[in-house]
Amino acid sequence: MPQIPQLSLRASRSKRFLFSLSGLLLSTCTQPQSNPSSTSVSKPISLTIPTDRPAFSADSAYAHIQRQLSFGMRIPGTSSHKTTGDWIVATLKRYGASVHEQVGTFKGTPVRNIIGSFGPKEGKRVFLSAHWDSRPFADQDPEKPREPVPGANDGASGVAVLLELARLFSQKPLPYAVDIIFWDAEDLGREGVEDSYCLGSQYWISSPQPYPRESYVWGIHLDMVGARGAAFLQEGYSRKYAPRLVETLWQLAQQLGYGQLFPALPTEPIIDDSYYLSARGGIPVVNIIQRDPLGRSFFPEWHTTRDDMSVIHKPTLQAVGELLVAFLYATTPEQTPPQ
Ligand SMILES: [Zn+2]
């Protein structure tokens, strides 16, 4: 079992860590007012997992990661980024989604958010999301810090799991509205430069959207969900903004036999897309993101040139996918209040 870190000693080398000491929170990006890790967590909602739920395929998700990497680096403004975006749109459409693209410029960077909608147009909705861009510089790589990050786990894994879910939605539609949202320009940030990460989600919050923000009951965000040896701890802002949903998902993981991958342990808040969507967008979001079990980093190849297919482990993709399938087919937005 991983241990709960008392203090993240390597916070200074991380892009998005906060660490807490005697109630004081520091961040490279922003200064929250209170310590979200200390928020008490609600009781989980008990759900019956339907036996007729569709089967998630890690093989399919794995192939989706390979495909994304085959296009090259997904750096905004490049032709390989455009090709990847076009492929994501085509794949969503193939699985029956109505696709809306939010294209523009935010803080001087071209942004292309891709939204695939399933189910009713009216009423309450939920979203599932991941970022689809990759980082232009491997600043955690001691040998090649100026080269781009292939982003097999950091970016492509989340996209792949969601595209496989889209296939399942086309096979067995959910009885409620769900949007799969791929955020662009998440990983262009510079350490210490406030709000330089997560440009796509910041742009979405500040622009007109196909569905009103108030219609989203909750969201689940994925990042780095495909590596060997992953541990998904309960991220601090998720515990603050969607505590009941956190407890429900982690309990469900336990029920499915994935307790080791999803230890019910809190970890520091992280500034990423889910933070902007929750704290600034007003939508409670659960962030499923790999953490070093000691809470000091994400995964060993994070922001290096070694974040390639060799990092990817099908059983991790399978566990995350199965958890989402079990949850999504067991519930409706009305049944699962996030708080
Ligand atoms: Zn990253």
Image: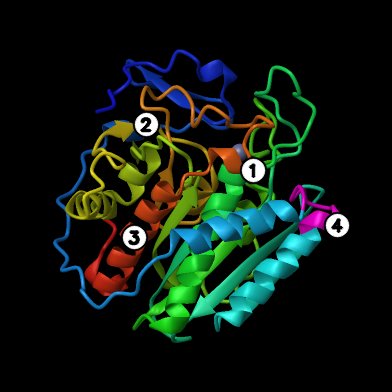
Q: Which residue is mark 1?
A: 151
Categorize mark 4 by other alpha carbons within 10 Å: few (<14), some (14-19), many (20+).
some
Question: Which of the two residues, 14 or 123, is positioned nearer the viewer here?
Answer: 14
Question: Which of the two residues, 211 or 336, is positioned nearer the viewer here?
Answer: 336
Quarter of the image where one finds residue 111 = bottom right
State the separation of the CA atoms marked 3 and 4: 34 Å
Quarter, ligand 1: top right
- Which of pointers 4 and 2 lies earlier in the amino acid sequence? 2
Q: Which residue is mark 2?
A: 34
Find out whether residue 295 is within the magenta segment: no
- Which of pointers 3 and 4 lies earlier in the amino acid sequence? 4
The residue at the point 38 percent across, 21 percent down is 20
Q: Which residue is mark 4?
A: 79
Q: Is mark 4 within 8 Å of ligand 1?
A: no
Categorize mark 3 by other alpha carbons within 10 Å: few (<14), some (14-19), many (20+).
many
Q: Is mark 1 within 8 Å of ligand 1?
A: yes
State the separation of the CA atoms marked 1 and 4: 17 Å
Eyeballing the image, is 91 above or below 108? below
Whether residues under marks 1 and 4 lie with C-beta atoms below 8 angstroms apart, the answer is no
Residue 205 seen anywhere in this rendered image of the structure: no
Q: Does the magenta stretch mainly form a helix, a strand or a loop?
A: loop
On-image quarter of the N terminus: top left
On-image quarter of the C terminus: bottom left
